[in-house]
Image (spheres, helix red, strand yellow):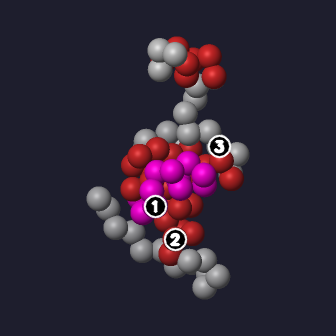
Amino acid sequence: MKVVQVKVPESLSERDVKVAAAVEAFSRGSISVGKAAEIAEIPIQEFLLELRKRGLTAYPYTDKEALKELKL
């Protein structure tokens, strides 16, 4: 994995920066939700909540498609 150094305002925590980078990469379709959580260094459930806070969906399924995929 590549390491990048970025100068950010004092008001941003390291966690904020990692989550923001992971959300951006995920929203561009560059990485999976699992990889994004790994980059953000948070559990996948927490990353899913972060996506929801930002109005982003983790999985592009309608309810009907999800039920079909899960064979329910």
Under circle 1, the secondary element is: loop
In the image: residue 62, left or right of residue 37: right
- Of residues 51 and 12, which is closer to you in this image? 51
For marks 1 and 2, give the CA distance.
Answer: 9 Å
Q: Quadrant of residue 20?
A: bottom right
Any part of residue 9 in sight: yes
**Residue 53: where, in percent of width, then height?**
68, 53
Using a 10 Å C-alpha cutoff, classify the residue at mark 1 as few (fewer than 14 neighbours), some (14 to 19) or many (20 or more): some
Under circle 3, the secondary element is: loop
Residue 61 among those drawn in magenta: no
Q: Amino acid at mark 1?
A: Ile
Q: Which residues are magenta?
A: 39-50
Main secondary structure of the magenta stretch: helix
> Which residue corresponds to mark 2?
15
Q: Nearer the viewer, mark 3 or mark 1?
A: 1
**Residue 52: where, in percent of width, then height?**
65, 47
In the image: residue 38, left or right of residue 8: left
Number of marks drawn = 3
Using a 10 Å C-alpha cutoff, classify the residue at mark 2 as few (fewer than 14 neighbours), some (14 to 19) or many (20 or more): few
Q: Amino acid at mark 2?
A: Arg
Asked whether the beta carbons under mark 1 and mark 2 sit within 8 Å of each other, the answer is: yes
> Which residue corresponds to mark 3?
56
Among all residues in the image, which is located at the extreme left? Answer: 1
> Which residue corresponds to mark 1?
42
Residue 49 among those drawn in magenta: yes
* Mark 2 vs 3, N-terminal side: 2
Q: Amino acid at mark 3?
A: Leu
Q: Residue at x 49, y 65 (%)?
A: 18
* Mark 1 vs 2, N-terminal side: 2
Asked whether the beta carbons under mark 2 and mark 3 sit within 8 Å of each other, the answer is: no
